[in-house]
Amino acid sequence: MGDTKQLAQTYTVVNNTQYDAGLFLLDRLALEPGMRVLDVGCGPGNITAHLANLVGERGEVVGIDPSAERIALAQETIRSRKNLTFHAGSAEDLSRFPDASFDILYCNSTLHWVADQPGALREFGRVLKTGGRLGVSGQSGDFVAAHQRIKDEVLARAPYRDYDHDVAGEPRFLKQQEMGALLDAAGFGGRTFTINKISKSTKDGAEMVDWLASSSSGKTYGGVPVDMRPRVREEMIAEWDKMTKDGLTMELDLLVTVATKA
Ligand SMILES: C[S@@+](CC[C@H](N)C(=O)[O-])C[C@H]1O[C@@H](n2cnc3c(N)ncnc32)[C@H](O)[C@@H]1O
């Protein structure tokens, strides 16, 4: 899927922005000791480990992620415990889990990478118990961030435009209305939407591009071959550095959804 061990390792040291967004989501989910939680798109597992602390020994947390590199890191670096396990897997196929087997489904900074979002929401609804809660946080589709403009601009240049960037998996940021429709179709009842306004600050363009690349498992570079990524990276950095003056700040609106399984 375009991920590399290096991108996965970089993500573990730069994901404080996603970690803080994950805590904001968590505040709205009211986790309790003894609950069973599924963390979909758990990445390197540091937030997943925090969830396991909150549910305690009587509870259980399972993290899944399609990136073999990120699951390997989670298994290597997070000390394994009786109440915390990691598995390779994707949001669209939760068939390893029975119906109604979780109290909470947690999905932070991930749903925009999922190719079949309606299918994933149906799976989330299936594995949640009645009254169970779904929490999703990710960039809002009602907002266009600077990283999207720069990516589109650079990948439209020769020779990058000759590659199929859709095949590599473009992110699909959901608008609030689209999220509402997906929840209706997947059998969710009550829901709340909150906009979490955040900003990502870096010292320069290079740090911003490296954060975007590791956060997107390389998809920042669209469908260009891995050996061409350093060239794309330099051109993206040049665009970001036009905006860099005593550092760089990118504003982002996150759509935070909490919905109850009817
Ligand atoms: C930005 S990271 C977020 C990781 C973690 N949730 C966090 O907040 O730090 C996005 C994660 O989504 C995962 N991902 C991509 N496609 C996915 C899919 N179809 N199902 C589940 N996870 C997916 C990636 O492998 C990556 O680990």
Image: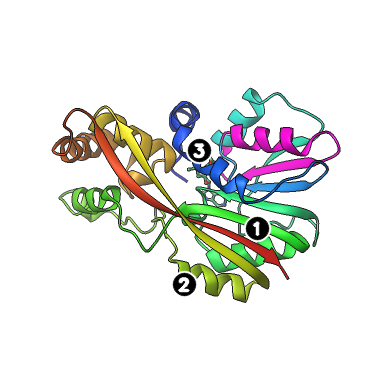
Residue 226 to residue 247: above or below: below
Whether residue 53 is in magenta: the answer is: yes
Identify which residue is drawn at 20% across, 34% down: 234
Q: Residues within 10 Å of mark 1 (few under 14, many from 20)?
A: many
Label 1 sits on residue: 134
Label 3 sits on residue: 20
Type of the residue with mark 2? Gln
Of 73 and 174, which appears nearest the observer?
A: 174
Q: Residues within 10 Å of mark 2 (few under 14, many from 20)?
A: few
**Gap in angstroms between the C-alphas marked 3 and 1:** 18 Å
Q: Tell me which corner region of the image, top left, top right, bottom left or bottom right, holds residue 134.
A: bottom right
Eye-nearest disc, 3 or 1: 3
Residue 30 to residue 231: above or below: below
**Gap in angstroms between the C-alphas marked 3 and 2:** 25 Å
Identify which residue is drawn at 47% across, 71% down: 178
Indicate yes or no: mark 2 CB to ligand 1 under 8 Å. no
Whole-percent x, y for residue 35 in the image: 79, 46
Whether residue 163 is in magenta: the answer is: no
Label 2 sits on residue: 177
Tell me if I can see residue 228 in this picture: no
Identify which residue is drawn at 67% across, 42% down: 63
Residue 114 to residue 229: above or below: below
N-terminal-most mark, 3 or 1: 3
On screen, residue 175 versus residue 162, left or right, reads right
Whole-percent x, y for residue 255 in the image: 47, 57
Whole-percent x, y for residue 240 in the image: 20, 39
- Residue range highlighted in magenta: 44-68
Whole-percent x, y for residue 50 in the image: 66, 33
N-terminal-most mark, 1 or 2: 1
